[in-house]
Every structure is written in structure tokens, then in C-alpha cells.
Amino acid sequence: MELLSTRMEVIGWIYTVCFAICYIPQIVKSIKTKKVQDISISLFVLSLIGYLCASIYTIGTIGINAVLITNYTLGSICSLIMIIVYFMYRYRLNTDIMATGDFQNSSYYQFLKQEQQEIDKLKWIESEKAGRDIGKHKAVFLWNKNHRREWMINRAR
């Protein structure tokens, strides 16, 4: 019976290690590439909630079980790290298109073109208010200071 218990303990630690490290390749890839557009953030949010609830349930029903608590703690940490990485990089643009030669048809080029149009509109409006041409540099400065963040957020929706 003790041999079976030892085997079960080993199996428990193996699955804990497997579940603990299963998020790490995605975390590393996202940090290296700084790209998270294809990440399902709901997977990591639900995992975090699930691990936290499982920890509370386990402690409340069977007490402290080192294998389970370690599994839930490491899973929670990895889920939280991936959520943080996602929010760090979610608005970054894919600029790799520069190397493909099809730049004018790329989403990056379209983004730059749209942003330039917004800056030109702002330049015209501010120049009209000032009664003179405010210049390109001031328009870009005003765009970045007052409008770009909101425009990026609205564009991402």
C-alpha cells in the first residue's frame, strides 16, 4: 500500500510540474516577439480564477495538500504573468511586414496612413483656430499628447 502511495505522490508531482510549465512557452514567445494578437486572454483570466478558487476549495475541504497547492500556485502565477504580458503588448503593431515587400498592402501601412490622415485633420483644425498654419511638428506633438492614445484604444475595438 505504501508503494502505491509513493507512486501516486510521484504522479502528482509530475502532473504539477507539467501544468506549472505548460504556460511558460507561450509567455516566453510573447515576451520575445512582443506580439499577443492571437492570444485568447479569456483562457488566462479563467485559468487564474479557476486556480484561485481551486486553492480555496482544496484548503477548505481537504486541507493543505502540497501537490495541489503547488500546482494551483504556479498555475496562478503563470496565468497572471501572461495576463500582464498581454496588457503590455496588446496595442503593439506588427512591423515585420517591412521585410516582405508588400508594405503598401499591409495593415501596418494602412494604420500609418490612417494616423497621418488624423494628424492632417488635427493640423487643419488647430491651424484654423490659430488663424495660421501651426506646422507639421506642432500637429504631431498635439496629436501624440492629446489624441493618439484614445484613437489607438478606439481603433483596437
Image (cartoon, grey):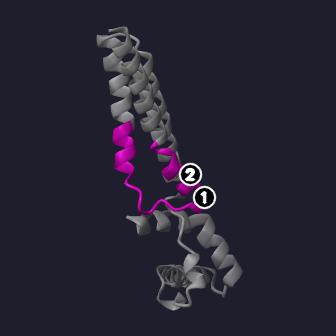
Circle 1 residue: 32
Q: Where are the magenta residues, as a range?
A: 22-47
Amino acid at the residue labelled 1: Lys
Q: Which mark is residue 28?
A: 2
Q: Residue at x 43, y 28 (%)?
A: 71
- Label 2, residues with CA under 10 Å away: few <14, some 14-19, many ≥20: few
Q: Is residue 144 magenta?
A: no
In x, y percent, where is residue 49?
35, 34
In x, y percent, where is residue 30?
53, 56
Could one spot residue 28 in this view of the protein? yes
- State the predominant SS element of the stretch in magenta: helix
Between residue 127 and residue 104, name the one nearer to us: 104
In x, y percent, where is residue 69?
43, 21
Q: Residue at x 33, y 33 (%)?
A: 50
Q: Are marks 2 and 1 in contact (CB under 8 Å)?
A: yes
Q: How many marks?
A: 2
As measured in the structure, the alpha-carbon distance from the residue carrying label 2 to the one carrying label 1 is 6 Å
Dot 2: what SS? Answer: helix
Dot 1: what SS? Answer: helix
Q: Residue at x 48, y 68 (%)?
A: 151
Between residue 45 and residue 65, name the one nearer to us: 65
Rendered position, 130 above or below 54? below
In the displayed structure image, the side of residue 100 where residue 3 appears, left or right = left
Question: Which quarter of the image is occupied by the N terminus?
Answer: top left
Question: Which quarter of the image is occupied by the C terminus?
Answer: bottom left
Q: Is residue 34 magenta?
A: yes
Residue 65's image quarter?
top left
Amino acid at the residue labelled 2: Val
Between residue 119 and residue 68, name the one nearer to us: 68
In the displayed structure image, the side of residue 128 where residue 11 appears, left or right = left
